Amino acid sequence: MPELTSEKHPGRVAAVLRELLVPVVSVAIAVIIGSIIMLIAGFDPIAAYSAMLKGAFGGGRQIGETLLRSTPLIFTGLAVAYGFRAGLFNIGAEGQLFMGGLSAAFLGIALAGLPQPLNIVIMIVGGAAIGAAWAFIPALLKAKVGAHEVITTMMFSYIARYLVSWLVTGPLKAEGQIPQTERLPVESTLPKLHEMFAFLVPSRVHLGFIVAVLIAMVVWWVLKYTALGYESRAVGLNPWASETGGISVSATTIKALCISGALAGLAGVTEVMGVHFRLFDQFSAGFGFTGIAVALLAKNNPIGVIPAAILFGALSAGGGTMQLEADVPQKVILIIQALIIFLVAAEQISRWILGQTVRRGVEDAG
Amino acid sequence: MLGDILTPDLFASAIRMATPIALAAIGGTICERSGVVNIALEGMMLFGAFMAVVGTTFTGSPWIGLVVGVVSGMALAAIHAFASITLRTDQVVSGTAINILALGLTGFLMEVIFGRPGTTDPVPRLTPVFNFGGPTDGVWDWINTIVFSYTPIVYMAIIIAVVGQWALFRTRWGLRLRALGEHPRAADTVGISVIRGRYSAVIVSGALGGLAGANLTLEQVGSFTEGMTNGRGFIALAANIFGRWTPAGSYLASLLFGFADALQIKMQLFRDVVAIPSQFFLMLPYVLTVIVLAGVMGRAVAPAAIGKPYEKG
Amino acid sequence: MAPPLVEVREVTKTFPGVLANDRVSLSLNAGEIVALLGENGAGKSTLMNVVYGLLTADKGEIRVEGETVHIRSPRQAIDLGIGMVHQHFMLVEPLTVTENIVLGIEPTHAGVIDFKKAREDVREISRRYGLAVDPDAVVRDLPVGMQQRVEILKALYRGARVLILDEPTAVLTPQEVRELFGVVRTLVDEGLSVVFITHKLEEVMSVADRVVVMRDGRVVGEIRPKDTDTAGLARMMVGRDVVFRVEKTPSTCGDTILEMTDIRVLDERHLEAVKGVSFTVCAGEVVALAGVSGNGQTELIEAITGLRKVESGTMLLKGIDITRSAAHETIEAGLSHVPEDRHRRGLVLDFDLMENVILGDHRQAPFAKHGILNFSAITEVTRKRIEDYDVRTPSERVHAGTLSGGNQQKLVLARELGRDPELLVAAQPTRGLDVGAIEFVHKQILAERDRGKAVLLVSLELEEVQSLADRILIIFEGKIVKEFMSGEASDEELGYFMTGGGGDKLNAGTGEVIVSDAGTDV
């Protein structure tokens, strides 16, 4: 039988562009469907989206707000993306995020005497460590017993929330009526970017954004250039071949899920240290779940997570304005988010629109 | 004090609390037996719960609300089925998207229909089926409370569990369902439509998820609060695994979680005596789920073809 | 004369890049056993899948009893009386024999299955065709030969008059093969038409009434076994004279490389799969483990390569104890492994060639230092390996999944041999490969041996074993039951010991097997 021809190797740039089109088209379709839903509910989608754009990019302060809201999403997006690359679904990023925030709130007070930047570094590392620790038991159960991480990390998510709820209403509660922790001393907080770089327009965006971008680059480098990243990817793609090649699937799984947890923990740390300066019950607006959409939209590429997170940060920043000016409930953003997830996962839809053929496996002829 | 805790209403409460988990778990059983993973039980339950309230609000009848809840669950399931079976997307991702969609949709519609976020006003509920009077202590009290005090959906759940168990192993439907999840190609070659079988299994699971949601709003609480399912859909997944992918097993496993829930509520009353913060009791079902999974996983075998999209030819 | 039961006329079928069937014509008559012979990739399975409705032909037609039909699904094929038993069984393992047989046409009352009637029906057919089965046995617990019977019964239950068997003997012991041939004779006497898809020349010679030979998607000839011999068939199959035995120089056995002493290994179900195996492999030697699938070879290989726990016994690799070693430790100790299933265990199909080449050594120099990968070294080494091992690919950056089977196997060899191991463990290294690739793999194995390395070969193919091995160890039910030097034993003798010598007498003088039950001459 004649040999099956190898796939023709496309030009690199053209291939990358073609790959980027799918997420773009997915977002476009989601936006359109979102408009339809708004129309049916009696809202004006054009007013809604223009209000959203105004709120997200209308000025220096708004752009800063967008970047602010994308900061935790970069971290949770990285967390979920790294997990996916290793074949794991860390749906419990929300819980690890909570624990990260908890550790920051606690350490911030406990380390009050230490000089900057030492205390900040310790707090950041501590948040990552506790996020990793929170993912450890689910990781262990997955590696040893095969327990599905979706269920276990989700359960730990609820446990974390109740834990925080108790601490914030009990042992760590600050004085006064509101269930929240003490405010962090200024030395334990992340400075706003406009305080560091005078040429920037004042806004709420803080150092955490820079840290997030740097971490994204580190994660990209780890996946591509280190043996650890190689092993994570190998196990994610084919655990049996990895095992035959001497890679310990259980060790790699545990490491990967813990790294994922650490990244999610960082989201909580930077939220507490940069935005709220204290911990309270509702401090996360579902960042862990939005991180899933971010990771998928970025095709699990750490660098791609940055623009994807900014997109969702924009949706969030613009959402308030949209509700205010066009009366559209912010919850519609969740609907758009779900649609994006669907469309990116079912990329056939976007590819069909783009006129691309979907690659199927080579048929077995014999 | 033990006597104050182990009262008939504790066990009755356990069965009541177990009901939505059990219904969702059985839905999960049927869906997964056909080879499709269903992470979206949580979303189907939430959406069903909400729409049940909507249906009841607009018609005044909780029975119509129940039907609306069931159909709503089926609608979300249809989306999951389309994505997973026809488009062959990753089933866990698709399920997660449905959960997020349900959150967004219920929140959005809350404001659009009821004008405000948070909680709806109370709606007429489904009342208990039997209404026997009689002495309020002794053996009769135990029997009356534990057997006869429930609302319709609670009984439905038990009937579905029993009938489902029998049907899975003794009817044509059950045999074909099991074949689909283990070796869809074998079923295909003997002329069974894999697509149709899986679609119907997924939609049935949506109906059960919606019914579970209706139980929450129309029987347990009487109104809808955003996010009220609170992870029950995921606990249902664990119950299904613990119950070895059988309807009866799922129901019994759900009783365990229902008991934890009931116990947690009961212990709140003793909070001062026991000096443990309420949050720790609230954590109980979730911790229990992790323990169950840790103990059971190695020995529980899922249907062989689960999660793998089927391609013809 | 009655029209043929099934007639295939000018059927053509293409896949992307491949012409699988090129204007093939063929007829199947009642009361006849036809062998469809050809190499891997000749188009035989494709053709039968078209007849069975799993695939649709692009051109041509099929006639059943003279009438043109359009078979678009197995359901239709079954309704027309065509049944097929695939290489990979279409059985639902957790279900019982009866449930599997009636699946899809269950006898029911209002949806409830009438198990009593189903069981009776199964017993009936089983009696009629002489295929004894236990209707209530769970399929998963049955031996492979019995599972195959259930598949045949499935077809008969549905009224098959044409039975297609796709490589049916690949998984059977010689005893089971003889039983199968007996069953097939019975079916044919009852008026069925049976088609054997196979690439095994001896089987064709012994059981077929007629042979249809395919090559490169075309029918190249039709002949009766009595009018030819295996050499003749081989020539038709391959298109040139085939050398059956590769020339090799006598081995020079050096140091003991692998020493296995009383190894015991458990299988998935915690039953003993390897029951006290001892042997050695020395440098410059090819030792072949010959045996039918399921006699412990897989578990033994997994134990050697560190993928499975050794319950008791010791394994030494060049004197180093690797009994408790994990996979990466055995690799470091100098062991290379070409696994049985190259898609699952051999390669990561979504990795490019470079990433596949370093699998197993990815933390060692020159590929990495302190855990950081060195891409220029990796690229250089990969390019060299691709060249040395004749892997046909446009670049080292394509995904391994886009390569053909032969090139994928060459890539695996490139990786495993590139490490310059002391011991090469190769499990079914030529499975599913075309002749050219098989030749290449055999050459590489012999080259290793000639360089003074040790090779442990596990293979089902007697031909491969006979041609490559210096020593042949026969494994049966977890034990080494016999050892032969190269050239000492005939295929028949090997087959005899592979079944533990089940019930046949071996003529010690001539080495011929005298068959004790009615059946075929082997």
Image (cartoon, coloured by chain):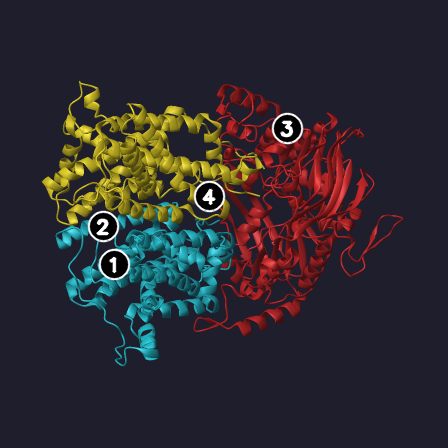
Question: What amino acid does circle 2 point to?
Answer: Leu
Q: Which residue is mark 3?
A: C417
Q: Position of residue B260 (x, y in %)?
A: 36, 59
Q: For mark 2, does the 10 Å Cα neighbourhood hold few (<14), some (14 to 19), or many (20 or more) residues? A: many
Q: Chain of mark 4?
A: A
Do badges 3 and 2 share one subunit?
no
Q: Earlier in the sequence, mark 1 or mark 2?
A: 1
Q: Which residue is mark 1?
A: B49
**Residue at (49% x, 21% y) in the render:** C375
In the rendered image of this protein, does residue A261 appear above or below residue C71? above
**Residue at (23% x, 71% y) in the render:** B127
Q: Secondary structure at mark 3?
A: helix
Q: Position of residue C128 (x, y in %)?
A: 65, 69
Do badges 1 and 2 share one subunit?
yes
For the colour cyan, the matching chain is: B
As measured in the structure, the alpha-carbon distance from the residue carrying label 3 to the one carrying label 2 is 58 Å
For the colour red, the matching chain is: C
Do badges 4 and 2 share one subunit?
no
Q: Residue furthest left?
A: A325
Question: What amino acid does circle 3 point to?
Answer: Leu
Q: Chain of mark 1?
A: B
As measured in the structure, the alpha-carbon distance from the residue carrying label 4 to the one carrying label 3 is 35 Å
Q: Secondary structure at mark 1?
A: helix
Frontmost of labels 1 and 3 is 1
User: Which quadrant of the figure has residue C230?
Assistant: top right
Question: What amino acid does circle 4 point to?
Answer: Leu
Q: Chain of mark 3?
A: C
User: Of the numbered discs in the image, which one, if any, rests on residue A140?
Assistant: 4
On the rendered image, what quadrant is the N terminus of chain C found in?
bottom right
Q: Which residue is mark 2?
A: B105
